[in-house]
Image (cartoon, rainbow, N blue to C red):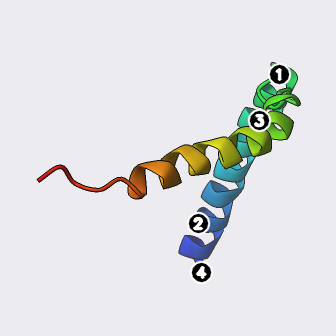
Amino acid sequence: MEVLYLTIGISVIIAGGFLIAFSWAVYNGQYDDRVTPSIRILFEDQAEIKKGSDDNQTPLS
């Protein structure tokens, strides 16, 4: 039974550490990039078009 108390205590400490790390990341602006996700969708189509045009080339041999 003591092992159960020990594992619960350790898991609460680890969860608290993750919560502190997440709070620190949010406070320091790690998740403030609001421009890139909206622009990324525009450039993926162009990358696929370029990739698709390379597939249609015939070998020179």
Mark 3 and mark 2 in contact? Answer it, CB < 8 Å.
no
Q: Position of residue 2 (x, y in %)?
A: 58, 73
Distance from disc 1 to disc 2, alpha carbons, whole Å, reads 33 Å
Front residue of 60/18: it is 60
Q: Which residue is identified by label 3? A: 20
**Amino acid on which the number 2 mark rests in the picture:** Thr
Q: Residue at x 18, y 49 (%)?
A: 60
**Amino acid on which the number 3 mark rests in the picture:** Ile
Q: Position of residue 18 (x, y in %)?
A: 70, 44
Distance from disc 4 to disc 3, alpha carbons, whole Å, reads 29 Å
Q: Position of residue 43 (x, y in %)?
A: 71, 38
Distance from disc 3 to disc 1, alpha carbons, whole Å, reads 14 Å
**Amino acid on which the number 4 mark rests in the picture:** Met
Give the mark nearest the N terminus, 3 or 2. Answer: 2
Q: Residue at x 42, y 49 (%)?
A: 54
Mark 4 and mark 2 in contact? Answer it, CB < 8 Å.
no
Given this view, does label 3 or label 1 mark the residue nearer the observer? 1
Q: Position of residue 45 (x, y in %)?
A: 69, 48
Q: Which residue is identified by label 1? A: 29
Q: Quadrant of residue 35?
A: top right
Mark 4 and mark 1 in contact? Answer it, CB < 8 Å.
no
Give the mark nearest the N terminus, 4 or 1. Answer: 4
Q: Which residue is identified by label 2? A: 7
Give the mark nearest the N terminus, 3 or 1. Answer: 3
Front residue of 21/16: it is 21
Q: Which mark is residue 17?
A: none
Q: Which mark is residue 1?
A: 4
Mark 3 and mark 1 in contact? Answer it, CB < 8 Å.
no
Front residue of 59/3: it is 59
**Amino acid on which the number 1 mark rests in the picture:** Gly
The secondary element bearing badge 4 is classed as loop
